[in-house]
Every structure is written in structure tokens, then in C-alpha cells.
Image (cartoon, rainbow, N blue to C red):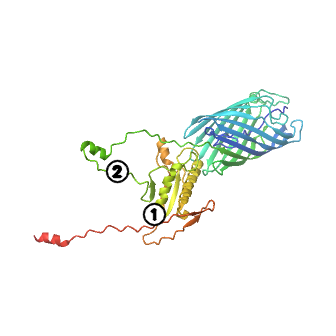
Amino acid sequence: MSVSADVEMVRPALGDEGLYGVEGTGLPEKWAWKVGVAAQYQRAPVLVISEGEIISQPVSDRVGGWAGFSLGLGKRVAVQAVLPIDWQSGNDAALSAPGLGGGDPRVGVRYGALDTTLIDTTVRADLYLPVGRQDAWLGEASPRGAIGASAALNGGFGAILLDAGLVIRELDSPEPRFDWGPTGELGVGARVDITPAFSAGAGWVARAVLAGLATGDGELASEALVSARYAFSPVVALSAGGGVGTQAGAGVPTWRAFALVTFDGAAPKPEPKPVLVAQPDPPTPKQILEEEIPGVTDIPPPEPPPAVQVVGEEIVYRDEIRFAVGSADLLPESKPVIASIADLLAADGRIAHLAIEGHASKEGDLVFNWDLSDRRARSVWEALVLEGVNPERMSWRGLGEVAPAASGATEGALSQSRRVVFRIARRLAQNEAAPIPSTTVNLPWNGQSVTLDAVSIPEPKAPPPKEIIDQSFFDEEEGE
């Protein structure tokens, strides 16, 4: 029996939104990259069975894993490269030499053919390079190509996954008979998104050697898998799980345990700039009157709205608060707005607590958007502290994309949703004594001492006096 065969059942994949062993349809954005490092243990992945009895264990234990890299080249195109490395042991060195060895590396390309709310599909093409170890059921003697497709039926719970492919290789029929040639592969699974950061799922993968299906001597093999995934941040995620063989065959372990760590280097998400079309300035009232009534020049133009003002239970601002693309770094042009809000808080000490909310549009990953909005809200909080506002008067939180300012997917609606909101969470009651503010504070993030602005407590506005009506005036009219 030839040992120059790559019998691994679970193919490494870095597609987003999938399961271990069942490739997903998600692709990284342009110039975004993803690195995955997996470790796994397989118990008895290769056995020799005669008349229903195990007569040899060429591979009784296999420990190892793989490392992979994926890079987005466009909106729908990504390339991948994967290198497997394993250490194995067994009791039949003639059929499989023990020790450390590398499998055949794989390079390939993915293309997102369909991307809708309900269904996503991705097609792929791969090339396996015959440079791995060929005396230990890890590699093959010739290169081979593979084509396939994956699909996801999306829902509010998660997704149902389907992955099918064909590996094209030379036909090999050694003695004793073990057909090894073109192979069909199938994977199905379901993923449940329990929280935005945590998901779990189960899958089933199967393989059939096409020549064996025709002669009756070929191999059918399958394995059931379960796994769970937790994203510690938009960058790092951990998956872990296991599997058991459901149809005995070469490459199907009695059981398998695995863990996978992925690192995402998301490309910066550009925030579209508003397109400004130059329009002629409308004539001011002064110009109109000069044209219609010569000699009238003393009507001033209307006053612009204030830079910041209190409207209801919010502090609204006229100009934009802007950040660097894809980050929480405030741009210099935002400093005047921050300074004006700090001046307003210093002038109105009856604003006892201000809640700073960060909001994002519905572009990109939900967890990434929440994290970015939270960090941007904190950046504004820090900037206000540096402007002299007591940090105890403020708090911040990120709301991500859950409260858009406008509906729709147009650039204008998305731009409106990327914002910072200042909500007045608490005011001093009319007769409530104002706290004595501190004059200095230590910055929470580095301990540096800064001087705070003096806070004024304006007197509450008295209601307008009621007009006093002389009732005798009506009495005189009735008498007349």
C-alpha cells in the first residue's frame, strides 16, 4: 500500500463566518490580512483493517497543526496560503515512518460570487505543492489542484453552511487495492451566533474517492465536528472543539481535539467625506434692501447659530468632531468644538453629569464598530478633561451601530450615523446645593496633575411675572 498520500480529512481554511473543517464565505477587505495558527491531536487517523479487524496501526497518534495566511486583494477577492506540520507515531514503520514532517503546502484564491442579506457564496481554486513528507501519509508525489464552492444561508440565529469541492490528482491503485485519485469532498454545518463575540456550531465532513465509487473498492470516509469561537477583540479570536469518525477510512481519526487562534489586521475603513458642491451665496437682507431701496445700508446680516448650545437634554454643536480614518485619534480641527463644550460646562455648573455617546454606521463588523465607537467616545472624554472639565462630571460609552441617525445605506445616511452625542444625564435640582469643585485633578490615564476650569453656577431663571389686570376697568364698562 502506498504511503505517498495526503489523507487529512479536515482541510485548513481561513474563511470568515465558517466552522473548523467547513469553510465559510467571508473574505477580508482589500489589503486586510488574517493569520491563523492551529494545533490539534488525532487518535489513530490511519488503520489497516482486514475482514473487519484492525491488523496494523501505521499512524496511531498525530500531533501538530498548521499555519495559514489570507490577504484581501479587492472587494471580493482574497488569496490564501497554508502550511501543515505534524509529528506522528505508529507501530508499522514499513507503512508510515514516525517522526516530524511537513505536509504539502497549499496556495489558492477565493472569489465572492454572491453577497446578499440571505445567501452568500464563494468559489475557490487551490494548488497543493508536493514538497511535504511522502513516507508518513502527509504528502503526495505530484502536484494536485482543487476547485470548490461554499455557501451560507444567513439568519438571525447564525447560518447554515455548505462546502463542496473536487481534488484532482493522478489515479493510484497499489496492491493491496487502495484506489487513490480524484476525490470529492463535502462539508455541511450550522453556526449559532450566541452573542456578537461568541458563536458555536457543528459540522460533518465527508470524502469519496471517485475511482473507488466506480469499482466498489474505493474509500468512503466521514467525520463529525463541534466547535466554539470567542472573539476577545476585533483582532484576536480563539476557536476550540473536537471531532469523531463516523465512517472509517484513511485519515479519519477515532477522535480529534483542536484549537485555533486567528489574528485579523483589518484595513482602515475609510470614512467618506461629504461632497460639497459650491453654491452662490444667497443675498443678505442688506443687499436686497440696497437693490430695492437705494440708500438703506444699516440692516446687519443675521447672526450665525452658536458653536454649541443646550437643546433640551443634549448639548448640540455646529461644527463636526472628526477622527482619523479607522481610529479614535481626534483631528486638530475638532479642538475648537471640544473647547467650546468645555467652556459651556464651566459656565453652567447645574449640568451635574454629561454622558458622551459614540455612534458608528452599519459598515463593517459589528464588534469592530462597537469597539471603535467606544474608543472615540473615550477620546472626547479625555480631550474635555484636558480642557479643564472635572472627569467626575462625565462618563462615556460606545453604542456602535445600534442607534443610527438615519436609515438607508446612502453615503449621507452613513455619514450622519458616525457621530458623538452629548446627553445631559443629570442636572442640579432648583434648591440642590452645588458641589464644591476641585481646582486640580490627576489625569486617570497617566497620573499627571492638571488645573480645572472654575465652574459657575447660574441662578435659576425666574418665571415671567403675571400681568395684573385692574378689574375695576371692566366694572366701569358694565356700568356705562
64 relative position to 273: left or right: right
Q: Amino acid at mark 2?
A: Pro
Is residue 177 depicted above or below 199 in this figure? above
Q: Secondary structure at mark 2?
A: loop
Residue holding disc 1: 347
* Nearer-the-camera pick, 256 or 55: 256
Q: Amino acid at mark 1?
A: Ala
Distance between the Cα atoms at labels 1 and 2? Answer: 25 Å
Q: Secondary structure at mark 1?
A: helix
User: Quick check: can you spot residue 52?
Assistant: no
Choose the circle earlier in sequence order: 1 or 2: 2
Residue holding disc 2: 302
Q: Determine which quarter of the picture holds residue 448.
A: bottom right
Residue at image x 17%, y 73%?
472
- The quarter of the picture where the N terminus appears is top right
* Nearer-the-camera pick, 480 or 94: 480
Q: Position of residue 410 (x, y in %)?
A: 48, 41
Mark 2, other Cα within 10 Å: few <14 / some 14–19 / many ≥20 = few
Q: Determine which quarter of the picture holds residue 182.
A: top right
